[in-house]
Amino acid sequence: MIESEADQQNLADLKDVAQAVEHALAALKSAMVGGPPGNREAFIFQVGFARGRLSRISSRIYQAGEFGEEPVP
């Protein structure tokens, strides 16, 4: 199966999302136990980063059509 460029971009973005969520979880856990004050900001940043990547994926899917097919030029 040949993946489209959009599929490859989505996969790369999903990997970034997974990593950002892992970092956000670590920052949240550290903030909850009284870690450095920057952990709250790190958590907020990572959640925002993940949200941005997910937004890019959903935008690509929306632009591709109802079933995610490639747009017709």
Image (cartoon, rainbow, N blue to C red):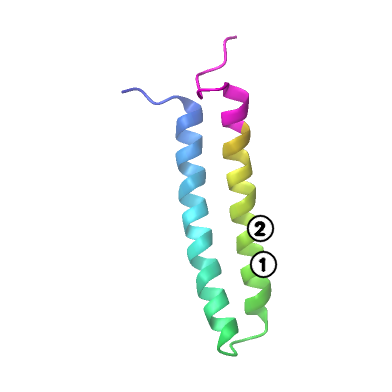
The local crowd at label 1, few if under 14, some if 14 to 19, many if 20 or more residues have their Cα within 10 Å, is few
Depth order, front residue of 59/39: 59
Which residue shows up at 66% across the image and 67% down it? Answer: 44
Q: Specify start and end residues of the magenta stretch as a single range.
A: 60-73
Give me the disc on residue 48: 2
Q: Which residue is mark 1?
A: 44
Q: Is residue 30 above or below residue 12?
A: below
Cα separation between marks 2 and 1: 6 Å
Q: Pick out the residue farthest to the top.
A: 73
Provide residue 63's location: percent of width, then percent of height: 62, 25
For residue 65, what is the image quadrant? top right
Which residue shows up at 59% across the image and 31% down it? Answer: 60
Provide residue 72's location: percent of width, then percent of height: 57, 10
**Magenta includes 44?**
no
Q: Indicate the amino acid at tag 1.
A: Ile
Provide residue 69's location: percent of width, then percent of height: 50, 19
Disc 1 is placed on an element classified as helix
The local crowd at label 2, few if under 14, some if 14 to 19, many if 20 or more residues have their Cα within 10 Å, is some
Give me the disc on residue 14: none
Q: Pick out the residue farthest to the front.
A: 66
| Residue 59 relative to residue 8: left or right | right
Q: Main secondary structure of the magenta part?
A: loop
Which residue shows up at 57% across the image and 16% down it? Answer: 71
**Magenta includes 62?**
yes
| Residue 21 relative to residue 42: left or right | left
| Marks 2 and 1 in Cβ contact (< 8 Å) | yes
